[in-house]
Image: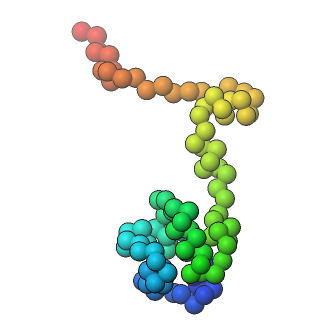
Amino acid sequence: MKAAERGIWKSNELRRLLAEAGLEISAGKMSGLWTGTPTTVRLDDLDVICLVLDCDPAELLIPEPDKAAARRRPEEVEKAVGGSASVVTPRFGRPRSDPPL
């Protein structure tokens, strides 16, 4: 949205502006940024993006508390909700016991 507000309608245009500001981004990483699904963004890169788009980081970042909560360990979730969370533990070795003969 910030790019559109600045009249930037193509990812190649934003990529060129970022390069002019000293941030070379691969086509793959630019695709992730443009679609709103970047794998990672370095804080230094975020500074340059904000400089080019004339905005603050808070205007680009979208909080996702559900995703953050999903990354918590089951014992932390249990403490947080005050109940018991079922924990699935993978078995290593043979995947199943042999069937009876």
Which residue shows up at 51% across the image and 61% down it?
A: 42
Which residue shows up at 64% across the image and 63% down it?
A: 62
In the depicted structure, whether residue 28 falls above or below residue 81: below
Give residue 6's quadrant in the image.
bottom right
In the depicted structure, whether residue 76 falls above or below residue 51: above
The way the protein has been coloured in the rendering is rainbow
Question: Which residue is situated farthest in the left direction here?
Answer: 101
Where residue 29 appears, x then y in whole percent?
A: 42, 68
In the depicted structure, whether residue 99 falls above or below residue 23: above
Q: Does residue 70 appear left or right of residue 39 in this picture?
A: right
Give residue 48's quadrant in the image.
bottom right
Out of 61 and 36, give the one closest to the viewer.
Answer: 61
Q: Does residue 11 appear left or right of residue 72 in this picture?
A: left
Where residue 55 appears, x then y in whole percent?
A: 66, 77
Question: Which residue is situated farthest in the right direction here?
Answer: 82
Which residue shows up at 58% across the image and 70% down it?
A: 47
- Quadrant of the snapshot with the C terminus: top left
Which residue shows up at 51% across the image and 87% down it?
A: 9
Out of 39 and 91, give the one closest to the viewer.
Answer: 39
Give residue 82's quadrant in the image.
top right
Q: Does residue 59 appear left or right of residue 87 in this picture?
A: right
- Quadrant of the snapshot with the N terminus: bottom right
Out of 88 and 24, give the one closest to the viewer.
Answer: 24
